[in-house]
Amino acid sequence: NSAASDVALKEYHILSMFTKVDQNHGLQEKFKICMKSMVEHASFRGTVNVQGIIIVLSPVSLHSAQQLAAQLVPLVQTMQRHFSAGTSSYFGDSIFFLSVAMHRILPLVILLDLDLKFKTNIRVLFTEFDRFKENAAIGIAYEMQPVYRHALWQYKRENADTPVGEPPPHGFPGFNSGVLLLDLNRLRRSVIYNELLTPAAVELLADLFHFQGHLGDQDFFTLVGVVHPELFHVLSCGWNRQLCTWWRQQGYAAVFDDYFRCNDAVHIYHGNCNTAIPND
Ligand code: UDP
Ligand code: MN
């Protein structure tokens, strides 16, 4: 399939978005651990992809700088001419136009939180794209706390036997977006996904599930995961081993471990809710 050949073809794109890092010492520490552990474990046969860290104000992308800039030039050079007045407009500046043409040059993207620590070569995570079934466009792991059991409480009361908000392997606990694989071509082409992005569809989803969340994109992916599970490839818990245990003490002690346990090998630790990551 096209995802497989794209990966075989050599391009690995990793994006991390963040803001306010300059004012946030905690985030700077997370950034260091995340990047250091990624680079320590990373190895890409045949091509060198991690050439440097490009800081584009915000968002920030870790990427092959020159390669990306070179691909952007034909797409944005006219814009550079018209919209970069007063700057030296050297070759590398095309990178500042990444935002407008990203969809043309990045077929597959992995989006990462900063509070991560790698135990495995991130290249292996790209091979998960090869395992996407025909209609899948998003790779994501389950949420490992009963937060959606809580948020979907009213829906669950009205739908007694629903697997929604229940723990794995039989239930659907919702998703965690700290490690996110996006097949941008498939997302762009998906009539269903783009329909789900419309205001009317979002209203309908929130109504249907009596849902008011606070976790942003992962709330959206979770609700979409209920109505269109075929859009998602579920990653092993080892690819996003979340460590936050906040919900255990919120009245969920009896069921917490059903959500939290992960018997697979840990590839990426996720120190969510500011949880320290073990030094093993
Ligand atoms: N983030 C950021 N600035 C902030 C807070 C968060 O850029 O002040 C970004 C950062 O990439 C972080 C992500 O948003 O990893 C999600 O936040 P966080 O990991 O703290 O949420 P959690 O995983 O604990 O729910
Ligand atoms: Mn996080």
Image (tube, grey):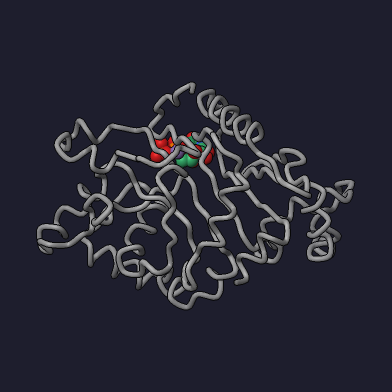
Q: Nearer the viewer, residue 235 or 223?
A: 235
Q: Who's the residue at 84% across and 48% down the image?
A: 92
Relative to residue 259, is residue 7 depicted above or below? Answer: below
How many labels sit on residues? 0
Q: Is residue 108 left or right of residue 199?
A: right
Can you give x and y, in whole percent of width and height, for residue 39 in the image?
66, 34
Q: Who's the residue at 66% across and 52% down the image?
A: 13
Q: Who's the residue at 50% across and 39% down the image?
A: 267
Relative to residue 202, is residue 35 depicted above or below? Answer: above
Image quarter of residue 106: bottom right
Q: Nearer the viewer, residue 159 or 237?
A: 237
Can you give x and y, in whole percent of width and height, for residue 49 in the image?
74, 46
Q: Nearer the viewer, residue 150 or 51?
A: 51
Can you give x and y, in whole percent of width and height, for residue 136 in the image?
47, 67
Q: Quadrant of the N terminus?
A: bottom right
Q: Who's the residue at 69% across and 41% down the image?
A: 43
Can you give x and y, in whole percent of width and height, for residue 42 in the image?
66, 39
Q: Is residue 117 left or right of residue 164?
A: right
Q: Is residue 202 left or right of residue 156?
A: right
Q: Nearer the viewer, residue 38 or 247?
A: 38
